[in-house]
Amino acid sequence: MLKYIDEHIVARIYGTDLPEKAATTNQSEQNSNLLSERAPNETELKLSAEADMPIYIKGRPVHFTSVHLLDTLECLIPDFFNEMPIEEVRIKYPSEQRPHLVYSEPDGVVDVTISYTDMEIKDHELEAITKQLSAVIRRVQPIRSWQGISVIPTDHMTLATMKFVVSVVDGDIYNEMLLLHNRGQLIIVTFHCDAEEIEDWRPMTDVLIRSLRLSTKEENTYESGLS
């Protein structure tokens, strides 16, 4: 059963159908960017300050903006990234098992995808599930370079990461996959860019990891992730 669920997750991440079993999801694909009217708390003020600090990408100063993802997740992304229209998402991720949400730079090559899975997870299972999922990815994807997995505690939560390069028709793509959970369900955030440009984009992935946090759906107030 775990093998089946993991391959479903791989299909969701990459938006491509995998051999053998196919799966469907009942998760909503709608994204809410609405904040309730209330005074910002200390964590939000810190987030705002981080968003105003320029980070250099390819020698250019880049400012970050806060976005809410799938009602319960918030992070910082470059202010020139926009939510990809569903028509473009369907082209880039042709399977019905595509990511729920995609933010990308204007040309659509570098992006951040968010996949809210059906997989149940408990606090202590994060590392073990990451290792199991990494084994599935290495089996079903054309891995060119596997750069390992790690568990990273941040100011807001603990998350697991997987870093690897896959070969595609016109080159190699760098993948940095971030795994976390909300209320017992696994969420996967994945960053993609050309493998040759990863060092240029590394400051963005650092900010993304540091800024990821969960918020409650009812009040949009922040809560800690795994401890």
Image: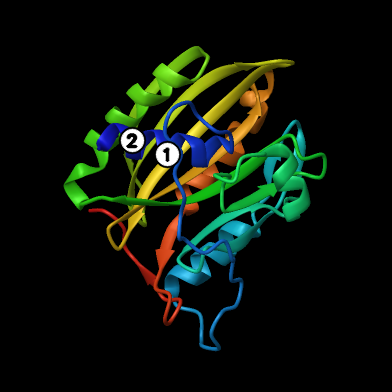
Residue type, mark 2 in image: Tyr
Tell me the quarter of the image containing the N terminus.
top left
Quarter location, residue 126? top left
Residue found at the very far top of the displayed protein: 144
Residue with the mark numbered 2: 4
Residue contact at pointers 1 and 2, CB within 8 angstroms:
yes
Observer-nearest residue: 62 or 205?
Answer: 205
Residue found at the very far left of the displayed protein: 124
In the image, residue 127 above or below residue 222: above
Q: Residue at x 31, y 58 (%)?
A: 225
Residue found at the very far front of the displayed protein: 20
Residue with the mark numbered 1: 8
Observer-nearest residue: 209 or 146?
Answer: 146
Measure the alpha-carbon separation of dots 1 and 2: 6 Å
Residue 83 can be seen, yes or no: no
Left or right for 92, reference 122? right
- Percent position (x, y) of residue 92? 71, 38
Left or right for 71, reference 126? right
